[in-house]
Image (spheres, helix red, strand yellow):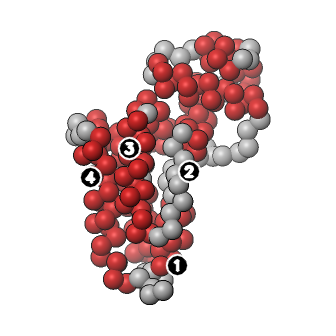
Amino acid sequence: MAPLNKTQESILSAYAALVDELGTDDVSFRLIARRAGVGERTVFRAYATRVDLLMATAAWIEQMAFARRACASIFDAPLLIREAMHAYDDRPELAHLVAEASMRGVDGAEPAPRGALFDRLLREEIPSLDEAERRTIVAALSHLDSAVTWVSLRRELGMDRADIADAAAWAAEAVLDPVRDRTRRR
């Protein structure tokens, strides 16, 4: 995501707060402008359409509201994915917005926030993995570590907070189990 100026940051922060409070349907550009402390025309100049605003806000939310903590080992991924599912459950309106935007493709956002980290950790800890196997593991973990997974488990399967976190973490464990014995001994 490109660096934001103070006005853009205020607009995105205001929109995210309003979505968190009201959902996406009841948030007008006028309300965003009022909350951000700027004129309505300023919002339109920064984000010409609602889709532009939605996409920029989703990228901002993923980085700010759903920031991930550091991961020292690829085998910590299931616990971090569990934490991400809890974070999405704590702020469902924001999780829905991020999931919708990631399905559309967000310019400047990471569709897989920890994909590069998972790849690096696999290269360091299990250098014997071939490229295809590493890509498959990164793809699986990245998919599990997403708002889309949370929304799917919540909406499609009607799972509750604990079951979503358990399912995502267990799936991540299942992805990692076949390579667990191939780690580089330190």
The residue identified by callout 1 is 124
Disc on the earlier residue, 3 or 2 = 3
Please say if 97 is above or below 150. Answer: above
Amino acid type indicated by mark 4? Ala
- Residue at 40% x, 32% y is 92
Work out how far the residue at label 1 is from the one at label 2, CA to CA, in angstroms: 22 Å
Mark 3 vs mark 1: which is more N-terminal? 3
- Would you call the spot at circle 3 few (<14 residues within 10 Å), some (14-19), or many (20 or more)? some
**Camera-side mark, 2 or 4:** 4
Instruction: Tell me if mark 2 has few (under 14), some (14-19) or many (20+) residues whose alpha carbon lies within 10 angstroms of its own.
Output: some
Label 1 crowding class (10 Å Cα cut-off): few <14, some 14-19, many 20+? some
Circle 4 is placed at which residue position?
167
Residue 131 lies, in percent from the top left, at 47, 77
Q: In this orientation, which residue lies closer to the viewer: 105 or 66?
A: 66
Choose the circle earlier in sequence order: 1 or 2. 2
Q: What's under tag 3, amino acid-wise?
A: His
Q: Nearer the viewer, residue 174 or 138?
A: 174
Q: Which residue is mark 2?
A: 110
Label 3, label 1: how many angstroms apart (C-alpha)?
A: 28 Å
In front of the other: label 1 or label 2?
1
Q: Residue at x 23, y 36 (%)?
A: 158
